[in-house]
Each structure stands twice: as C-alpha cells, then as structure tokens.
Image (tube, rainbow, N blue to C red):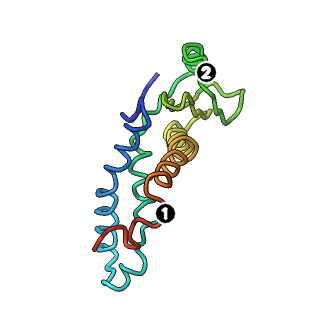
Amino acid sequence: MDTQGALSPEALEEAQAVYEAAGPTAQQVVRETAKAMAFDREEYRERVTSEVIERARNVLFAERLSVTVGSRAAFEEWREAHPTYDVELQGSDNVERLAWHSAPFAETVVAVTFQNEPEAAIGTVRRQAFGRIYRPRFEDDAEASDGPGTESENGGDE
C-alpha cells in the first residue's frame, strides 16, 4: 500500500480551516496566472470572479487529500476495520487495485478501481471526495453562517 497526500481531517472543523486557509493562496495563484496571460485591469475585473477563485481553492484543497493505493484485499481489510463507514465505490469488481480516501468525520470512504493508471485514479478519488463529502458540507456551513453573496465579485482582490 502507498499513501499520497497528507490531508485526512478527523473533524469537519479541521477540514473547513484548511479549506479557508487555501483561499489566499488561490487568489495569488489566479492573480499570477492572470498576469502571465497579460490581463489588463479591466479584463481582470471582468474575468476573475469569485467563482474562479473558489474553483482554484477547491483544487488546492482536494490535491492535499490523502489517498491510499492498494490491492482489493488491502481495501477489504480496511473496510473490515471500519464497518460503520459508507462506501462509495466506482469501477469494476474484476479489477484488483483501488485508490481510496476516507473522511472520519463523515464516516465515508470514496474509492475507485483501476488497472494501470494510479495517478489518474488518485485524481479521480480526490475530485469525487471533494464533490461528495467536502463541498456539500462547506456549502451548508457557508449558507448557515453568513448566507450567500458575502464574497465580492473579484474574490476579495481589491
């Protein structure tokens, strides 16, 4: 078995803190990318929206998620040790290798099978985990705490 990435939050609050901390980095990445693309001030204001910054933050967060790569037997052993977890498994039952990410606070594991491309499987697991486990909870928390429309259109880059 091999594990890539270091982020495996035990609590939702821990995940939210890491996600929030990625915001300034996402803004800087987008700002530097826009500079490299020679956006003038007007084009920057027009094209670099809060949605663009948020998507960059989503990627920065998801790319840090811990993903384990191993055999089906290793995954089944992990499942036996975590019987209360919901399992979201995509792929074929006839494939021997899996990649998975578990979220203890959600008691959920997202897994995909793969034959030859572990990096592609790791990327898929990270996207699936973010979309199915983290994003819905982050959105619920944002709506509960301060409602929609609290971020400026340019992602706070004034």
Which residue is denoted by mark 1 in the rendering?
A: 148
Instruction: Give x and y (percent) for residue 51.
Output: 46, 66
Residue closest to the eye, 100 or 23: 23
- Viewer-proximal residue, 94 or 85? 85
Is the residue 83 above or below the residue 148 in the image?
Answer: above
CA gap between label 2 and label 1 equals 42 Å
Bin the neighbour count of mark 1 within 10 Å (Cα to Cα): few under 14, some 14-19, many 20 and up. Answer: few
Mark 2, Cα crowd under 10 Å, few <14 / some 14-19 / many 20+, is some
Local secondary structure at mark 1: loop
Which residue position is annotated with label 2? 72
Q: Name the residue located 68 percent from the left edge and 35 percent from the top edge.
A: 91
Q: Is 85 or 151 nearer to us in this picture?
A: 151
Quick one: SS at disc 2?
helix
142 sits left or right of 128 in the view: left
Name the amino acid type tagged 1: Pro
Tell me the quarter of the picture where residue 113 sits: top right
